Amino acid sequence: MRGVDPTFATATELVAALADRTISSRELLDLHLARIEALNPSLGAVVALDPERARRAAERADEATAKGAPAGPLHGLPMTVKDVWETEGLTTTAGAPELAAHVPATDALAVGRLKAAGAIVVGKTNTPLYAGDFQTHNELFGVTNNPWDTTRTAGGSSGGAAAAVAAGLTPLELGSDIGGSIRNPAHYCGIFGLKPSWGVVPSRGHIPGPPGTLSEADVNCGGPMARSIADLRTALLAIAGPLPEDSPAWRLELDAGPAVADVGSIRVATVFENGTDLLPVAADVQAQLHGLAGRLAAAGASVEEVPLPVSLADGLESWQELVLPLEGTKFSDEEFASFCVVDSMEGDDPFVRAGQALVARHRRWLAANERRQHERAAWAELFTRYDVVLAPVMPTAAFPHDIERPITERSLDVDGTAVPHMFAMAWCGAIGSVLLPVVTVPTGCTPSGLPVGVQVVGPYLSDLRLLRLCEVMVEAAGPGYEPPPRLLEAPSGP
C-alpha cells in the first residue's frame, strides 16, 4: 500500500487504497482475518465471525471497483461491530447466555446504514452482560484484555471494540454509550471515539432493550470508534439520520459551522480541577491532560481553566436519576419489590440514591428530566464563550482486571484513595446525561506506558464542527493514535 501499513492504517486511508486498487477488498479482509486468528486468543476482543459471507461481499466490492461502479464512502472496507447491535444472519448476544442462539433476521438501523455505505461486517466484538459494566467480560466469551497490557481492562462496555481497533483487528467499529461505554474504552486503549449528540443516531436494533424494541432509550448513543477523526466523521455521516417513520418529514443537517482557520482561533475551556472532592484524578492522568492543554496553548489556542457549569456531584445524580430507571426495567417483579425497600431511606448517600433510581416512580424521573433541562441550559451558556470543553474521561489509566466481585464491591486505587466503581464513571455520566457530543482524543501515555484520553465536549448538535475542531487540535498538539508497541511485530498480512 505505497508505504502505509494496512494493519494500522486509518479507515480513510484504506478506503482510498481500495478505490485506487493498490489493495483489494478481499486482500484487506484476509489480512484482518489473519490478524484476528493470530492475536484474538490473547485479547478476547472478537467473539463472532462471518468470514464466508464477508468474502463474498468483498469479491462483489472488488468487481464493482474494477467496473468503475459508483461506490459508497466505506466501499469494500471490512469492519466489526459491538455485539449489542443486531446483525442479520450473525449472532447478537449482548453477552447474555439467554441470547447465545439469537440470530437476527434484520440489521440494526445503524448497521444497515454502514452496509449501505459499502462496509463489510466481518464480525462482532465483546461486551459485558447487557453492556452493563466498564470492564468487558461475560459468561459466554470471557474477558477482553487491553492490547497495551493484557493484565488490564480494555474498558467497557465497548471494550472489545476498542481493543480490536487499537490492535489492528479492525479499522472501524460501531460502539454505543450510555455512561461512557465508547469514551472510557477509547481512553483505556488509545483510540478515538465519538459519542454523538443524543438522537442523531437511531438505537433501533440495539440490545438492550430486548430484541424488537422500537423506542429510543434516553441518553444511549451509537457511535464510531476508529484511529482518526476523519474516520469518525465518515462513519457518523453514514449512520446519522431519522428513524424510517420520521423520514418523510424530518431531515438531519448537521452544520459544520464556519471554517476553522487554525488552532489559534479555538477557545478551549478545561475543567480538570473540578470535582476532585467527589472523584480524584490520578496524577499521571492529570499530567497528560495538562500536557495537552499546555501544547494547545503553546500552539496558539486560547486555553482557560473554568468552573463546571453543573457540579460533578449534581451531574452524576442526574445521570443516576435518568439512566438507572432503565436498568430497573430489567428486574423481575420479585427483584423490583426487594429493591423498593431503599425508596423510604433518607440522606444523600450515592449508593442509596442509585438504588432509589433503579425503582423510581415516573414523577421522580420527570423531576430529574426538568433538572436536566436546566443543566443543559447552563452548558449551552458556557458554549457561548468557549468552542470546546476538555474534561477527564476516567480517574485512572487502564487498571488490572477486577471481575471476581460484584460491581458494588469494586473500587479503583487513585493514588492511594479507594474510589467505588459506581462513582468512577462520574465524568462520563455527568456529561452524557446532558446529551452533548463528545470526542475521546488520545493525549499520550503515562510513564508506565498506558494510554490516556480526554473528553472533548461540544454544544448539542455541533457534532461535525466538534470533529473539525478536534482535527485541528490534534494536528497542532498531537499525538493521535499510536499502535500498542507489543503488537507492532505481530502478523500484518500482505
Image: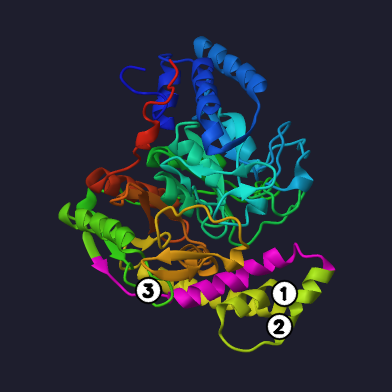
Q: Toward the viewer: 467 or 140?
A: 140
Determine contact: label 1, label 2, CB under 8 Å: yes
> Does the stretch in magenta take in 320?
yes
Q: Few, some or many C-alpha atoms within 10 Å of disc 1 (few <14, some 14-19, many ≥20)?
A: many
Region rendered in magenta: 304-333
- Above or below 303: residue 491: above
- Horizontal and vertical percent position of residue 242: 62, 48
Q: Amino acid at mark 2?
A: Asp
Instruction: Check the picture and name the quadrant holding the C terminus.
Output: top left
Query: How far apart are the alpha carbons under marks 3 and 1?
Result: 29 Å
Mark 3 or mark 1, earlier in chain: 3
- In this rendering, position of residue 140 left or right of residue 308: right
Q: Amino acid at mark 1?
A: Val
Residue, disc 1: 359
Residue, disc 3: 276
User: Residue 281 lies in what quarter of the image?
Assistant: bottom left
- Above or below 105: residue 453: below
Classified by dominant secondary structure, the portion drawn in magenta counts as helix
Q: Amino acid at mark 3?
A: Thr
- In this rendering, position of residue 419 left or right of residue 442: right
Instruction: Check the picture and name the quadrant holding the N terminus.
Output: top left
The secondary structure type at the circle numbered 1 is loop
Mark 3 or mark 2, earlier in chain: 3
Residue 380 at least partly seen: yes
Residue, disc 2: 343
